[in-house]
């Protein structure tokens, strides 16, 4: 940080874009570099970890639905305009988590393919795919939990 004399501080040099720079003091950095250069950066690493944690929550919520008492047919689709418009077995509820998992994995694989070992920093496309994977996982969890809550009502 550098002060301009008026009390305002300006970001200079190393501090600009700090969340995108590689970890230099992290002892686990060698492990992440050995796996893939995309994982050296904090931002894409936490987006990927967050996406997988959200997917784990999605699958836990999806398999909690069949334990609803008296659930012969479950709500498999709900809209705010028409309300409940599809009923089915609990196996039909697995389509949402399965589709979300496929899209998250596709985004993460593409992010890994777009980052080559000789890249100094991940491309903006790789970072965008990591964020998209996180948002897809969040939407999948939200949809699964909302369907779960409709089946409890």
Image (cartoon, grey):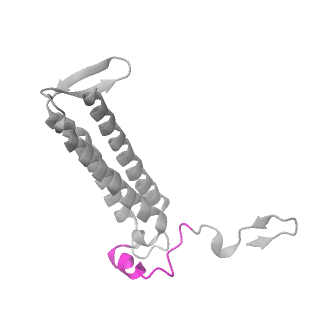
Q: Residue furthest front?
A: 69
Where, quadrant-wise, is the C terminus in this rendering?
top left
Q: Residue furthest top?
A: 82
**Is 63 rendered above or below residue 83?**
below
Q: For the point 23% across and 42% down, which residue is it?
A: 62
Quadrant for residue 38, please give it: bottom left
**Is 92 rendered above or below residue 125?**
above
The spot of residue 13 in percent (x, y) is 68, 74
- Viewed as shown, does residue 136 lie left or right of 120? left
- Viewed as shown, does residue 119 lie left or right of 142? right
Q: For the point 30% across and 38% down, which residue is it?
A: 144
Q: Residue furthest right?
A: 6
Where, quadrant-wise, is the N terminus in this rendering?
bottom right
The spot of residue 39 in percent (x, y) is 40, 69
Nearer to us in this view, 133 or 77: 77
Q: For the point 16% across and 37% down, which residue is it?
A: 66
Label the magenta part by its dominant secondary structure.
loop
Q: Which residues are magenta?
A: 19-36
Nearer to us in this view, 22 or 73: 73
């Amino acid at each position: 940080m550098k002060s301009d004399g008026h009390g305002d501080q300006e970001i200079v040099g190393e501090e600009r874009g700090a969340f995108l720079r590689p970890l230099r003091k992290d002892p686990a950095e060698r492990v992440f570099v050995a796996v893939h250069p995309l994982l050296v950066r904090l931002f894409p690493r936490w987006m990927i970890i967050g996406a997988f944690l959200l997917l784990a929550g999605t699958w836990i919520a999806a398999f909690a639905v069949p334990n609803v008492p008296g659930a012969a047919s479950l709500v498999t689709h709900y809209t705010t305009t028409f309300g409940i418009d599809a009923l089915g077995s609990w196996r039909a509820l697995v389509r949402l988590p399965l589709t979300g998992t496929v899209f998250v994995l596709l985004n993460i694989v593409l992010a890994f393919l777009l980052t080559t070992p000789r890249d100094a920093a991940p491309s903006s496309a790789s970072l965008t795919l990591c964020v998209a994977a996180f948002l897809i996982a969040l939407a999948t969890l939200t949809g699964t939990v909302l369907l779960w809550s409709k089946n409890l009502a």
